[in-house]
Amino acid sequence: MNDWKKNLNIVYSTNPDFHYEKEGEQNAVETLPKEKQLLRISLDKRNRKGKAVTLITGFVGSENDLEDLGKLLKTKCGVGGSVKEGEVIIQGDHREKVLGILQKEGYAKSRII
């Protein structure tokens, strides 16, 4: 593919350190170690037609690592859920169970709010 076509919006730069930003090039977020993660577990009923969900927030890291954590929690709880906008959503009220799973996995600073 022709890379020069992606650079057509840059005419000229006097900055000697200037580099073209290529599509898909993003600063990778480094995932904090499990013992340094401060995860917050809460119950949420807002905008969910009265259904309760367990929200896990505060994860610092890559989207793939967050997806893996969400998959682990959904499997261990035996329920459905999703990962959206940096949050893990688990269907139902599973706060105590999620806290136990996270602590067993090494997320020592996790807490229920």
Image (tube, grey):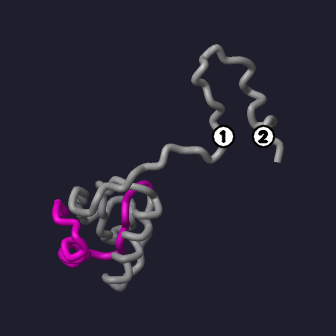
| Residue 30 image point, x, y percent | 39, 51
Q: Is residue 65 above or below residue 100?
A: above
Looking at the image, tell me whether mark 2 or mark 1 is earlier in sequence order: 2
* Residue 11 included in the magenta stretch of the image: no
| Residue 88 image point, x, y percent | 37, 65
Asked where in the image residue 46 lies, by quadrant, the reply is bottom left
Q: Residue at x 62, y 47 (%)?
A: 24
Q: Is residue 111 visible?
A: no
In contact (CB < 8 Å): disc 2 and disc 1 = yes
**In this figure, which residue is indicated by the disc labeled 2?**
3
Tell me the kind of residue under disc 1: Lys
* Disc 2, SS: helix
Asked where in the image residue 81 lies, by quadrant, the reply is bottom left
Q: Residue at x 32, y 57 (%)?
A: 59
Q: Residue at x 20, y 76 (%)?
A: 104
Q: Residues in magenta?
A: 85-113
Pointer 1 local density, CA inside 10 Å: few below 14, some 14–19, many at least 20: few
| Direction from residue 97 to residue 6 in the image, left or right | right
